[in-house]
Amino acid sequence: MLGIPRGAADWVKRGPCVRLETPHVSLGEDGSRVFLDSPAPPGSVGWLAVPGPAGPLPFSSAMSPAEWRALRLAVKREVLGATVRRALDALDSLGGRGGGSVVVVGGPAGDDEVLGVLARELPPGTVVGRGNVAGVLGHRYAVAYGLATGACPRE
């Protein structure tokens, strides 16, 4: 959608961005202006950026921070919200939904925006939460844990 490498897209989709207005000032998605602790990298002024692994990661100069926020949340709503709704509908057709709650695990569970999008997209009264795999692994490693426990013989 943005024409950027997949690795950069993985950072960009995670959350809020800023527009680097000057080498020393950024404009947030909520309209706030913040003085930067250190000057923005050369060539990134005028670009939207997110915190990346090596500092600010510029990714677009074609839209405002508010436009990117709206687009990012719309994509999450259309992809994740629609997928979870379909899964719940399939469960309903099999005889139940397990009490109106959804537990999110894996990488998407680390994204607070995903939890908010799902809470708004699902039927009223559906509780959305982040799982803690095996009570110790946090939200990650759900598939690996399931495969490992499924491969172990039961006594």
Image (cartoon, rainbow, N blue to C red):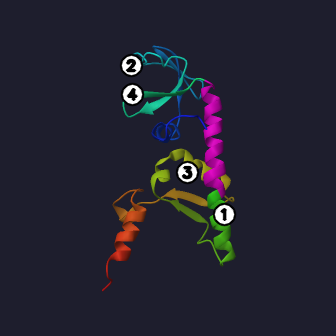
**Disc 1 packing (10 Å; few <14; some 14–19; many ≥20):** few
The residue that label 4 is drawn on is 55
In the picture, the disc for residue 37 is 2
In terms of sequence position, does the residue under pointer 4 or pointer 2 come before the other?
2
Q: Is residue 109 magenta?
A: no
- Residue at horizontal 35%, vertical 73%? 149
In this rendering, position of residue 53 left or right of residue 90? left
The residue that label 3 is drawn on is 115
**Disc 4 packing (10 Å; few <14; some 14–19; many ≥20):** few
Of the 4 image quadrants, the one containing the N terminus is: top right
Q: Give the residue type at disc 3.
A: Leu
| Closer to us: 34 or 20 | 20
The residue that label 1 is drawn on is 86
Residue 4 x %, y %: 53, 34
Q: Give the residue type at disc 2.
A: Asp
Label 1, label 2: how far apart the Cα atoms are: 45 Å
